[in-house]
Image: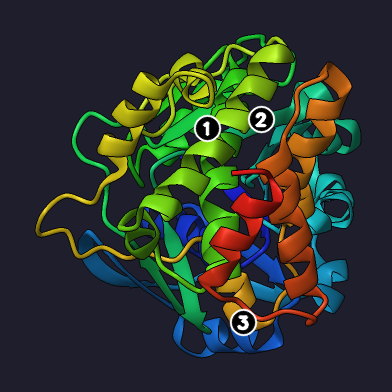
Amino acid sequence: MSHKILFVGAGAVGSYLASFFARAGHDVTVIDSWPEQVETIRQRGVSVTGPHDPFTARFKTLHIHEAQQLGADFDIGVVAMKSYDTAWAAHLLAPHVKPSGFVICAQNCWNDPLVASIAGPERTVGLIMSGISVAMWKPGEVERGAERGSGHVVFRAGSPDGKSTPHLKAVADLLSVVDASQTTDNLWGERWGKLCINAMGNPVQAMTGLGGRDVASEPRGREITIRLGSESARVGLALGHRVVKFGAATAEQWADASRNAETYRTIDSALVPKAGSTRNWRSSMAQDVVKGRRTEIEYMNGFVVTQGKSVGVETPVSAAVVDIVREIDAKRRKPSPDHIEDALKKAGY
């Protein structure tokens, strides 16, 4: 069945998903605030590369000020903006999705409740995207990094209230043209697991200018990764979430790593890059810093720190990292590998 789909956001994630949907025969429209991106897609489409056959996709693309030409007959809406743009994007999108349709929150961080408050909880689907990395360094060119391997389910669709609805199955079916997908009754546990992955990788690469392999190649790079993962896991578990396994271990093992030397060593060993590995991908936050854009630090590690305070879990490394990235956002610091040592020492390690 062909769907009429409206995206707000034509960045890396939005363009990548929209391209696959359009290629699969869906009627896709994308709105974006990046003028060069809109004009490039209009002129030559989107070039899509990655661990799959390359292709070029074409779909209708609008500038923000052209949204008034849209009707209210879309089957599906997709919010694919940065976290700090969630509210206005959802308000722009929701009126154009018909009452029987639904809105997908295709973002990092904890934005599903905000989208649900605007679009309606019964019309909101949270989408977890795990083990997929995409980048857009130039207008009209989106690239996906290497896949995690066979058997990994990249997309998980869940409802904010935990209920199973036909919308979830529809989203899983829709995403199957991109990669493996499934429904989940544990949106918050899945979301927190993804938040942990983001919180222990994104800011370290953003504040150092290093790629993921560079960070993991050094003991102190792995240490800051483990301590950020441990703090994030302890907060999620203290909040009562059924946090799913993420990265190299279960949430419980990550939480234990800051207290148990044997658990720490096990995870540390798992993080050492494999011989022959050359993948040195830059996270979305690192991409933002390179482009001079505002980061999502307040919505990743900042959220972990805030939630930690609410349940009495200390998060000193997360807090130190937030302070450094805030300084980079404010242009008072530049990325440097030295920031790893700065953050760990400030936190007492």
Residue 274: image location, x then y, percent: 16, 49
Q: Which dot marks residue 25? A: none
Closest to the observer: 317 or 22?
Answer: 317
Mark nearest the camera among 3 and 1 is 3
Q: Which residue is mark 1?
A: 171
- Asked if one can make out residue 111 in the rendered structure from this viewpoint, the answer is no
Q: Marks 3/2: CA distance?
A: 30 Å
Closest to the observer: 243 or 172?
Answer: 243
Q: Which residue is mark 3?
A: 291
The C terminus is located in which quarter?
top right
The residue sitting at 36% across, 37% down in the picture is 176
Among the two numbered marks 1 and 2 on one chain, the one whose residue lies closer to the N terminus: 2
Q: Which residue is mark 2?
A: 125
Residue 210: image location, x then y, percent: 44, 70
Provide the secondary structure element on which disc 1 rests.
Answer: helix
Provide the secondary structure element on which disc 3 rests.
Answer: helix
Residue 39 drawn above or below residue 260: below
Residue type highlighted by circle 2? Val
| 224 horizontally vs 261: left or right | right
Mark 3 crowd level (few <14, some 14–19, many ≥20, 10 Å Cα): few
Q: Are the residues tagged 3 and 1 within 8 Å (C-beta)?
A: no
Q: Are the residues tagged 1 and 2 within 8 Å (C-beta)?
A: yes
Closest to the observer: 209 or 55?
Answer: 209
Residue 139: image location, x then y, percent: 53, 84
Residue type highlighted by circle 1? Val
Q: Marks 1/2: CA distance?
A: 8 Å
Among the two numbered marks 3 and 1 on one chain, the one whose residue lies closer to the N terminus: 1
Q: Quarter-wise, where is residue 263 in the image?
A: top left
Provide the secondary structure element on which disc 2 rests.
Answer: strand
Residue type highlighted by circle 3? Lys
Q: Quarter-wise, where is residue 141 in the image?
A: bottom left
